[in-house]
Amino acid sequence: MTLFGYDQGVFGGVIVTQDFLDTLHLSGDHNTGLVGTVTALYDVGCFFGAIGAFSIGEMLGRRKTVLLGTTIMSVGAILQITAYSVAQMIVGRIVAGIGNGLNTATAPVWQAETSKAAWRGKLVVIEMICNIAGFSLSNWVTYGFSFVPGPVAWRLPLTLQFIFIAILFATVPWLPESPRWLIAHGHIEEAEQIIADLEDTIVEDPWVITESKEIQWAANFEREHGMSWWDLLRGKTGAGNTCTLRRLLLGAGTQAMQQLSGINVTSYYLPTVLINSVGLDEKLARLLAACNSVSYLLFSLIGIPNVERWGRRKMMMYAAAGQAFCYLLITILLRFNEKEGYAHQKEVASASIAFFFLYYVFFGIGWQ
C-alpha cells in the first residue's frame, strides 16, 4: 500500500515540473486537457486491474496475484521513466494502473483472510496509513527534486518507486497464502498448517480444526449457492438468500463514495490548484502540498485506536460532512479570489489553503 500511495502522489509533483511539460510538449494552457487525460488514465488502468483481480486472483491465489500486479507495475514504471512522448507516457500510466489495480484489489482481501476478526478494523486503518505514508513521501521527494534542473527532477522521483517494488518482490514470496483460498481449492492440510502458524499453535489444536471446518463450510456454501456475474447484475439473489447484490452494492458503493469525495483528484492536482487558482509560486505550492501530506498522515493515526470504539459508519458520516463543508468554503473562497476588483483576494486565497488542509484532516480520520 505504500507503493500505491507513492505512485498516487508522485505524478501530482511531476505534472508541474517544467522539464516534464517541455519534454512531452505539454506546456501551455491549450494542453491542460491532455495533461488531465494522461493523469486520469492511470485510474482507468486501476479500474480494469481491479476488475481483472476477480478472476485472476481466484485462479492464481493472493500471493501470485500481488507478484503479477507488481511485475506489471514495474513495466508501467519503466515506460513512464523512459518516456519522451505523450503516447509512451499514456501507455505507461495505463499499464502501471492495471498492476496497481490488481494489487489494491487483492491486498485487503488477503489481509482480512489471514488476520483475526478483532484486528481487522485496526489493520485496515494501518494499511491505509501505509498508503498515506507513501503519498507523503512522494510529495517531499518531488519537492526536493524541484530544486534540481533537467529531466532528473521528474524521472528520478518516478524511478524511486522501484524501492517499494523491490521490497514487495523480496517479501511477498515468503508470506503465507490465504487459508480461505487454499481450502476453496482443495489444499486443506496446507491451509490448516498456515492457520496454526498464524495462531502460533499446532495443527491438532481444537481451535485450528474448528476454524478449518468453518471455512470449509463457508466455501462449500458459496460454491453451492454461487451466482454468475450476469445473474448478479440482473438482481438475482440466489437460492441461499446470500444477499450478494446488497453486499456488493454496500462495499462497492462505499469505495465509490470515497473516490467521489474528491480525494484522488485533489491529491493529483493540489500543487496545480495552489499555483493556478490560489496564485502561489511553484516552490511554495509544492512545499504546502508536502506539509499537507504530513498533516494528513498524522491525523489518520487517530483512526487506529478509535475505529472499533466509534464504529465505521459514524466515522464516515462525520468525516463526509466535514469534507463537504471544506469543499463548499474552498469553492466560495476561490470564486472571490478570481473575482476581478475584489479587495481581499489575497486573504480569501490564503483562507482556502487552510480548508484544503482541513479537508485532508477529515478524510484521514474517517474515510481512510
Image: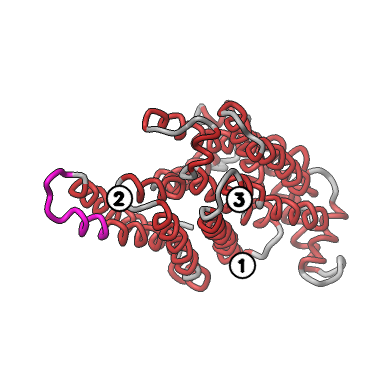
Q: Amino acid at mark 2?
A: Gly
Q: Residue at x 40, y 63 (%)?
A: 361
Cβ–Cβ below 8 Å for labels 2 and 3? no
| Sequence-earlier tag: 1 or 3 | 1
**Looking at the picture, how far across and down is residue 273, in whole percent?**
36, 47
Which numbered mark, 1 or 3, is in the foreground of this view?
Answer: 3
How far separated are the C-alphas under marks 2 and 3? 25 Å
**In the orientation shown, which residue stands out farthest toward the front?**
149
Task: Tell me the magenta residue range.
Answer: 339-351
For residue 279, which numbered disc appears in the image? 2
The residue beneath circle 1 is 119
Label 2 Cα neighbours within 10 Å, binned few <14 / some 14-19 / many ≥20: some
In the rendered structure, the answer to whether residue 69 lies left or right of residue 136 reads right
**Looking at the picture, how far across and down is residue 6, in whole percent?**
58, 53
Mark 1 residue element = helix
How far separated are the C-alphas under marks 1 and 2? 45 Å
In the rendered structure, the answer to whether residue 368 lies left or right of residue 2 reads left
* Residue 54 seen in this snapshot: no
The residue beneath circle 3 is 157
Cβ–Cβ below 8 Å for labels 1 and 2? no
**Looking at the picture, how far across and down is residue 307, in whole percent?**
49, 67
